[in-house]
Image (cartoon, rainbow, N blue to C red):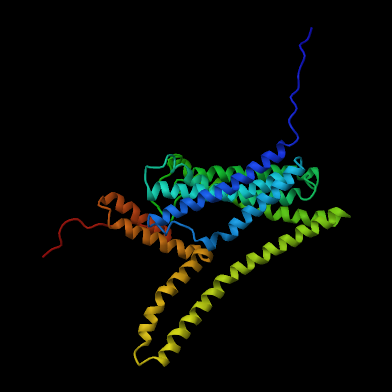
Amino acid sequence: MAPEVSWVRIPRRWPSVAAGALWALTVLGLVAAAWLDHLMRRAGRTDLSSTAIANIPEVVAALSAATVGAVLAGRRPRHPVGWLLLGQGLVVPVSSAASAYAHYGVMVRAGRLPAAGYLAGLANGVFFLWFSLAGFVALLTPTGSLPSPRWRWWARVAAAAAAVQLLASTLDPYPLVPEDPAFLNPLAPPAPLARPLGVVGGAGTVISLLALVVAVGSLLLRFRRARGAERQQLRWVAFAAGVVALLAVVALLAWGLLTVLLGLAYAAVVLGFGQLLPRGSSLAVAAAFQPARRRVQDAVDRRFNRRRYDAAQTIAAFSARLRRQVDLDTLTAELLGVVDQTVQPTTAALWLRHGAPPG
């Protein structure tokens, strides 16, 4: 006699519970990232912390995606877009918390936080998953399935590219550049494999960005074929995409606009007050305005001109370490690393003169 098989029925509310748990993890991750940022500020490492204003768009995007995803996944658990949106919302706090944990555990409290160095590369790779998930959201909207079976191969390529990019970032030998160019990832592969892995990871990044563009193009194809409710849904998606694109353009223009306004304000204050105050006071006014100008310009560069900001922070961090460094070999390696990251020469070498100079 065959034994009876009893089937365990999963409660219908489990998708809502799982979606709510992922939403709660998103909120807790944002709180954890903010707390670690506060600890770095309290330790005097404001160069490693993120300004609250600059992070507002990321926080809003994370909470919005997680909230919409939780509602959609709870009501229509078989629709993949809801879970993808939850993933998008969770990516931001996971990346921010991991990055803050790595910086705090490696550069602020070295050796006191377990596995801090192992998270440095992972934090960079996880953040980039946001774009891959956005591509799949566009590719599967609004039906939850691909536009046609012919898109399966491209979906597999996009998923493989995201996985390769994440792996390459996790194994990146120098994931804390430019803040700490001398830190070596404990997960880094041997030197002969590092360069090929970087090339493969770069290819994965390019394919992931291309997949996002292709996914947006698939929405246009869907719109041409859609009728009724599906066409109306795609109109709302197109409207949301247009708003996001407009905000991106405004953000890019904001850097130039703020820089121009800052220069005009500086000229108005110095020249205007110089005419009202006694002769020779223009230099005093300019000196008084310099701290405010530097802080505003620093905030603008940090948000909109990362290359300039990163170079400045690299030099500042190296200057701080230079006062405490006594080992010549370590100092040489750090100096060459700073030159490579800031100036980016084709080749770099350091010549040290031994012995006392002739009298």
Compared across the picture, whether 292 is left or right of 326 comes to right
Residue 266 appears in view: yes
Residue 246 placement: quadrant: bottom right
Residue 345 appears in view: no
Q: Quadrant of the N terminus?
A: top right
Residue 343 placement: quadrant: bottom left
Is 3 situated above or below 341?
above
Q: Quadrant of the C terminus?
A: bottom left
- Please, which residue is most extreme toward the top here? 1
Compared across the picture, whether 335 is left or right of 76 comes to left
Q: Nearer the viewer, residue 241 or 206?
A: 241
Identity of the residue drawn at 71% across and 38% down:
15
Is 47 situated above or below 291?
above
Q: Nearer the viewer, residue 200 or 116?
A: 116
Identity of the residue drawn at 44% across and 70% down:
295
Q: Nearer the viewer, residue 273 or 190?
A: 273
Q: Position of residue 107 (x, y in %)?
A: 39, 50
Q: Position of residue 265 (x, y in %)?
A: 49, 81
Compared across the picture, whether 76 is left or right of 49 comes to right
Identity of the residue drawn at 40% across and 52% down:
181
Identity of the residue drawn at 33% across and 60% down:
319
Q: Position of residue 183 (x, y in %)?
A: 39, 48
The total of numbered circles placed on residues is: 0
- Please, which residue is most extreme toward the left here? 359
Q: Position of residue 5 (x, y in %)?
A: 76, 17
- Please, which residue is most extreme toward the right here? 228
Q: Nearer the viewer, residue 240 or 151?
A: 240
